[in-house]
Image (tube, rainbow, N blue to C red):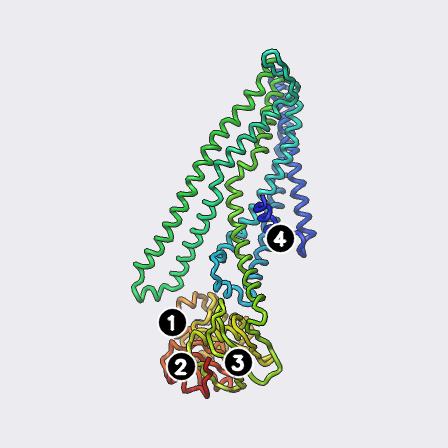
Amino acid sequence: MNHQENFFIKFMTLAGPFWRSKNSFIIWTETVLLIGLTVMQIELAVYITQWNAALFDAIEQRSMAGVKTQAVVLMLIFIGSITITTVHLIVKRRLLIGWRTWLTEKVIAKWIERGRHYQITLLSQNDHDNPDGRIAEDIRIATEDAIALSHSLFYCLLMLASFAQILWGISGRVVFEFGSVSIPVLGYLVWIAISYSICASIFGWWMGKPMTSATHSRQTQEANFRHDLIDIQNHSQAIAFIRGEINEKERLLDSFRAIIASYAEQTTSWIRIQIFTSGYSVASMALPILVASPRYIAGAISLGMLIQSVQAFQHMVSALSWPVDNMAQIATWRTSVERVLGMMHALDHLERDISDLNARQIHVNEANVSGLRFNNVRLEGQEGEKLSSVVNHQINAGEHVLIADQANNGAKLFKAIAGLWPWGSGQIEIPAGQATFFMPPKPYLPAKSLFEAICYPKAKAAFDQAEVEKKLEQVGQKALIKQLNRVDAWADVLSNEQQQCLGLVRALLHRPQWIFVQEALDSLPPDDEAKMLKLLAHELPHAGILTITHQPAAQAFHQRKLKI
């Protein structure tokens, strides 16, 4: 029970503040309207049972006038039902998309800020895999199914209260005789409905219990399969070059076999549920007539009241059967909620991990200093293992410094400067107000127009097209000028050399004071790499340039080395 409560508390802590957000007045208005429309739906359902009773009484009495009257009433019910159902759907879907939008924005903001989307990949836990699926699909299910389930539960509670009252009145007083003992029972149909539903719910819960774990396994394996497909697509050229198709085929098939196994597990769970629901639906159809017909045969109730009691019995059983009827949807909803909570837990764990480091972490600050300063900086692994020596150094504006030693440690130093690698000790001071620019081995080129991809992360309005064309010529990519307005997946279309040249163009356009080149020109011929570094220094003479490279020609460009 504590586990269940803890689960709901965590979910409401995460998603509940939606009703206290900036649009709370509109949200509460829609919520109250949805509740009101649900009450109207129940009232309409109650009125339909009364209409059925009146109709069958008129038929039993062979009253044509009565039948005509009920036909007119039916038209009013028809119009009312369509109106209430349509407005209810509109309000419900507005609330659904509003909650999903709010929660999606909240999760994305936490995941994307301060490089957490990258740092979370360094954690060893597996409860944060496939963030794309968790954000796009699991949040949708978590919010949509929460409202759907809450609405259906509220509807069933109202239906239970309304039809239990009707059924109690129709049941009257029945005397059960057991030999010489007579037991009078009031509302016997109500007690039969309750007993039947409780027994069915317990048995149905036991039959459907394996569905939760089976659904979780299925969703996880489906997400893993999608991830593997995307991974192969992103590295298709490298795989094709080394003829790795057989390996990747086996990897995909292994991943798909895991889906088949989880599918089989889920199918077994579905079979158990279907066995129960099939028998349950047949019994629910026949039982109310069998238990109510003795009073009609005895002449205690009319045919209309018999029909009304059957419908009331079925409505009441349906309301009491909510846990059983929604078992599969609850399992799917809970699985998605746990996946979203798992991702948020991993992000919280990352925050705590970094915060708990306190003094044992690398602090990056903007300060009133003349150059980039390293004060007792030591790189460490996530478990505290030492990766580098202590660095006490200052790099002045306009200096060109080669990061010597292991490239892996050099990359971690760049990450530390960017605030992405806090593990270690010491302090890094960056001159206040001076922009930094990191050039990774492969620049990120979004699938927009080539102009927008080059200008990223700034908007294309920040740069003049003539300036972009000039820079493309300077880096030897004049042929790309005519494609500036073309939209494409540039990471797949362009060669590594072209992409790295565009990364250089981006740096020239942004004109930062500090540039960190992490093997960002290594796809170029050695002499061309040195030539591009010289171009960077010529265009930005006051910029400090720190480089990780293994090309002797490029190494000669630098004025000194920094060993870490």
Q: CA distance from mark 2 to mark 4?
A: 53 Å
Residue occupying the far right of the picture:
25
Q: Which residue, given by chain and number where applicable, does mark 2 sit on?
A: 529
Q: Residues within 10 Å of mark 3 (few under 14, many from 20)?
A: many
Q: Residues within 10 Å of mark 2 (few under 14, many from 20)?
A: many
Q: Along the line of sight, which residue is nearer the eye, 382 or 471?
A: 382
Q: Give the mark nearest the N terminus, 3 or 1.
A: 1
Q: Which residue, given by chain and number where applicable, does mark 1 sit on?
A: 495
Q: Give the mark nearest the N terminus, 1 or 2.
A: 1
Q: Give the mark nearest the N terminus, 3 or 4.
A: 4
Q: Secondary structure at mark 3?
A: strand
Q: CA distance from mark 3 to mark 1?
A: 27 Å
| Mark whose residue sits in front, 3 or 4 | 4
- Tags 2 and 4 touching, CB below 8 Å: no
Q: Indicate whether 299 appears above or below 40.
A: above
Q: Along the line of sight, which residue is nearer the eye, 49 or 400?
A: 400
Q: Indicate whether 136 appears above or below 428.
A: above
Q: Give the mark nearest the N terminus, 2 or 3.
A: 3
Q: CA distance from mark 2 to mark 3?
A: 19 Å
Badge 1 amino acid = Ser
What quarter of the picture does the N terminus occupy? top right
Q: Which residue, given by chain and number where applicable, does mark 4 sit on?
A: 13
Q: Residues within 10 Å of mark 1 (few under 14, many from 20)?
A: few
- Tags 2 and 3 touching, CB below 8 Å: no
Q: Give the mark nearest the N terminus, 2 or 4.
A: 4
Badge 3 amino acid = Trp
Image location (x, y in percent) of residue 487 = 46, 66
Q: Which residue, given by chain and number where applicable, does mark 3 sit on?
A: 514
| Mark whose residue sits in front, 3 or 1 | 3
